[in-house]
Amino acid sequence: MHKPLLLALIAVSLSLGGCKKREVRQVSAETPPVRVEARRVEPQPFDVTVPITGTLVSTAKVEVKAETTGKVLKFPKEEGEAVRAGEAVIWVDDSYKKLAVLQAEAAVQTAEAALERSKVLEAHNRSEYVRAQNLLKSGGITDRDYRAAELADRDARAQVALAAAQLAQARTQLEHARKALADSIVYAPIDGEIQAKLVRPGAYVEPPTSVLVLVDNSRLELESLVATADLAPIRPHQMVSFSVDAYPGEKFQGRVVEISPAVQPDSRSAKVRIRVENPGRRLKAGMFAQGMILTGVDQKAIVIPAAAVYRDDRTAKTSYVFIVENGAARRRNVRIGRERDSALEIVEGLRAGDIVIAQQSIEVAEGVRVAAQLPVETAASPR
């Protein structure tokens, strides 16, 4: 009587077990696909660039030297302050120079008086000589007196020439004294900013003591050493975009003006000079800059987001992505070309029309069912 009951219980248990297995299989089959952001691969323009690093330098940097001797009395400007061309910046003791000017002026006056006196004597001796000539014709003068009158005339004319030369010399010495007085004030030769004060009030200067350094940050150039492997596409007038640490996230513009005709043997690089636009003078000489030279545009490049690429490090050129085929993720090896900000050029492994998963995810693997979400409009090409 117990045996039939036991068999019935076993049958019910087996029936319930079979139902649970079918339920598990049904749930497994209905697991939703992984939602992923995706991009359709389409050829698009992509900037061809050469990366650069370098230092900003001023094309107008002047080391000002003293042209006089004496003690510095005033130097009120401080480093970093702006000056205008022709503005007085340093005053040197000029007391002895003023005395020298007064002395030279007195010497000029003395020479002028001497010249006037010699001209009066010349006129007198000239008239005496003319009189002697007339007397000689009538026999009213001895030969000896005639010769004396002639000699006095010649001497008077020589004295006038001598006095004129002495006056010219005195005037030259006066100009020299006045220049020495003017040189006791040091003027800025260019518009710019004081990069360095090399003397202070109380210091003794003499030619050619350096007293300050001026730099004009409105005229800057970026000097960069470019490897020979990257030199071929660089040309004058190409646009340059760069950034500096002082202004993170901000881009500045420039233009190539010169490529050095010779390569430096120690680094196998050539210097490239880039003229920088700096109207607001925010950039300063000496700043470190990094950026790129735009050498061209590839109109049909295959470009994908950098976040879509799986690679061991940013320098790896061979990596892989996942594309969507028939609703499943498929791994595709790719070769990376140029890199620009958050975009990568793919030179091998993808073709137009492929749908690439745009973001890496631990849920995505080979064969995993995915639901690709494509943007409504194609994103703007990275430029």
Image (spheres, grey):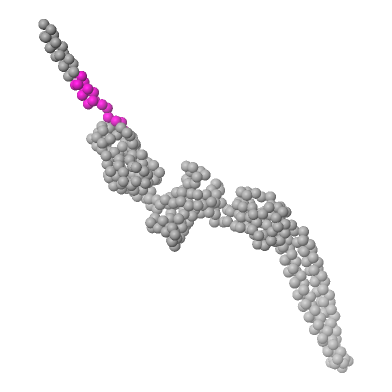
> Is 24 located above or below residue 252 in the figure?
above
Query: Where's residue 327, x and y in %?
Result: 25, 33
Q: Please tell me in which quadrant of the rendered image residue 304 appears.
A: top left
Q: Nearer the viewer, residue 126 or 28?
A: 28
> Is 188 located above or below residue 21 in the figure?
below
In the image as oriented, which residue stretches furthest toward the top? Answer: 1
Q: Is residue 283 left or right of residue 360?
A: right
Q: Is residue 273 left or right of residue 121?
A: left
Name the residue at 56% across, 51% down: 217
Q: Which residues are magenta?
A: 19-36
Q: Is residue 32 magenta?
A: yes
Q: Nearer the viewer, residue 317 or 277?
A: 317
Q: Is residue 350 visible?
A: no
Q: Please tell me in which quadrant of the rendered image residue 58 appears.
A: bottom right
Q: Is residue 12 magenta?
A: no
> Is 209 located above or below residue 317 in the figure?
below
Q: Please tell me in which quadrant of the rendered image residue 119 appears.
A: bottom right
Quadrant containing the N terminus is top left
